[in-house]
Image (spheres, coloured by chain):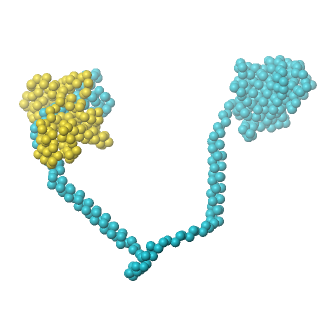
Chain colours: A yellow, B cyan
Amino acid sequence: MYENLKNEAGIILNVQDGDREAFTELVLFYQTKLRSVLSFYCSSQDMVEEFVQDSFVQAFVSIKTFDPEQPFFPWLKTIAMNKLRKAARYREVRLRKADDYLYHLQISRSEEDPNGEISEANGLALKNCLAKLDSHQVELLKNRYMNEKSLDDLAEVYGKKVGALKVQIHRLRLILKDCIKQQLEPDVLT
Amino acid sequence: MNTEEKYQNFDLQVMNWLEGELSEDEKMSLVKIIQTDKDLEQRFLAVTSVDSLLKAEFAPKRKSSELLARLEMSLPSEAQKKQTQKFILDRINKIEERNEKEAQRKRKRKPTSTSTFKNIPVPRRTQTVTKIKKLPQQKKKRTAPPIAFWITLAACVAIGFWGYDFYLHNSKIQLQPKPLLVEFGNLQKISGNVSIIRNQHEIAKTENMTIYVGDTMVTGEKSFGNITIPDGSEINVGLKSKVSFNNDNGSKQIVIINGLVSGKIAKQLPGKPMIFTTPNAQAIVLGTSLEINNNDKSTKLSVTEGKVRLVRLSDGKSIIVTSGYNATVQEGKTLKLEELMAPDDPRRKYRQPGN
């Protein structure tokens, strides 16, 4: 599983004393992990960012109730998952557009995973599966997801048609999907 | 469309949705597909999860600075905390001040003495008056309630009784099951003064009306009624007769209270004979032509076709009356067969019904 922040208890004690800089350390260390957990349930990155931000704000407000001897991330994750489930219930009655339904469909899976364990398992499986891909495939994904290059830009870089590139990226998603499923079996968590 | 094609088409839609290239109608189409196919729903969730996880995995570092900036704006600062604390304390102080003022106003309103004159100082002695021991209160004299009270009470009691009685009456009506009307036969022909009594009420009679189990037919002078039974039997009720029709476990019972009954009885089911009952005799019929004449003292059975067992109810003795014979049950008279008189025999004492 994930590593904990070094001297986490001391940092948390400082935050409890009102040290905002110390809290920044917690945010920098745990934000990616939290984003990864939440991303499993939400394909809209804007929504993920909202949940990440809300979760950290909630953690800061309630930090005095937290026992510094305990690991911070499970507590933060619980806050995030509660927010996700609350949003799923809230959105259930406010489905107006197709996107609302599709996002709700993703978020509502959080009801079965209160501790975000399925999400974390999928995240780890993805790392393993990425390691199995060819370097040019990983490069394509990095260009698409890390550098956030548009399909038009990528088509120009790779000298391919936009449609062909789109299909290639989607095929990589399908390969990863099957790989993750294989990794998680026999638990079949996907 | 085979499974592979179905997945290909679906993947294309999901891919375009992830790229944000689907129109609202196309999104709705995607939603409908997902709603109807659980397998595709799982596929959608798996593929979109991979996409999201990839985004999270390769999330650019700049997001950290963005998040910190946003958090900086969202997190409550010390100044904000102090401001909030001050605001809350101010509110508490204001509420306490208001409560204090309210209490003071109430204290002012409260009279300090028994005097009604506010401006006149109350002498010290008057204040001590309140400390004097209270005199025992005089017991209130009981007075009889006014007559209107008794009238109202009586009316209430009467209404209560009436209501209870009404309730009981209605509940009885509701509890009594509606008598189940079982068809006995059909009144084919009537002549003269014939009446049908059902549930102790005389009902209008018409030809071809249905006679139900429990009905009673009463005929007057020069009257008769003809009833056909679904099994093909035919019963004639002669003049001055009173006959009721019953059914006991499928066995038809014709109770001749008095008068004359004749009939042609179709073959009855085994163990379910048709029974003609008079106050002193019983004729058990399985299929025959007969005539029963009952008066106050005797019952005479005439059989023109088939066999009938005639039972004397007083002692249970019985006789089988065969075709062409009759038998009479009468007190003091031996139960024996007698030869049937021809229709044109001058000794016949009664007329054939309808004649």
Q: Position of residue B226 (x, y in %)?
A: 77, 30
> Image point 73% across, 34% down: which residue?
B215
Locate residue A59: give its quadrant. Answer: top left
> Image point 11% across, 27% down: which residue?
A138
Front residue of B118 and B276: B118
Q: Locate the N terminus of chain B and report the quarter of the image it occupies.
A: top left
> Image point 18% across, 38% down: which residue?
A69
Q: Is residue A59 visible?
A: yes
How many badges with numbers are in the image?
0
Locate residue B298: give its quadrant. Answer: top right
Q: Is residue B67 visible?
A: no
Q: Vertically, is B225 above or below A132?
A: below
Q: Is residue A87 left or right of residue A45?
A: right
Q: Position of residue B302 (x, y in %)?
A: 84, 23
Front residue of B50 and B145: B145
Locate residue B110: give its quadrant. Answer: bottom left
> Image point 73% across, 40% down: which residue?
B201
Q: Vertically, is A176 above or below A9?
A: above
Q: Vertically, is B285 above or below B97?
A: above
Q: Is residue B137 left or right of residue B237?
A: left
Q: Residue furthest right?
A: B346
Q: Position of residue A110 (x, y in %)?
A: 27, 35
Q: Position of residue B238 (x, y in %)?
A: 82, 31
Q: Residue furthest bottom?
A: B120
Front residue of B286 and B9: B286
Q: Locate the C terminus of chain B and report the quarter of the image it occupies.
A: top right
Q: Is residue B29 left or right of residue B353?
A: left
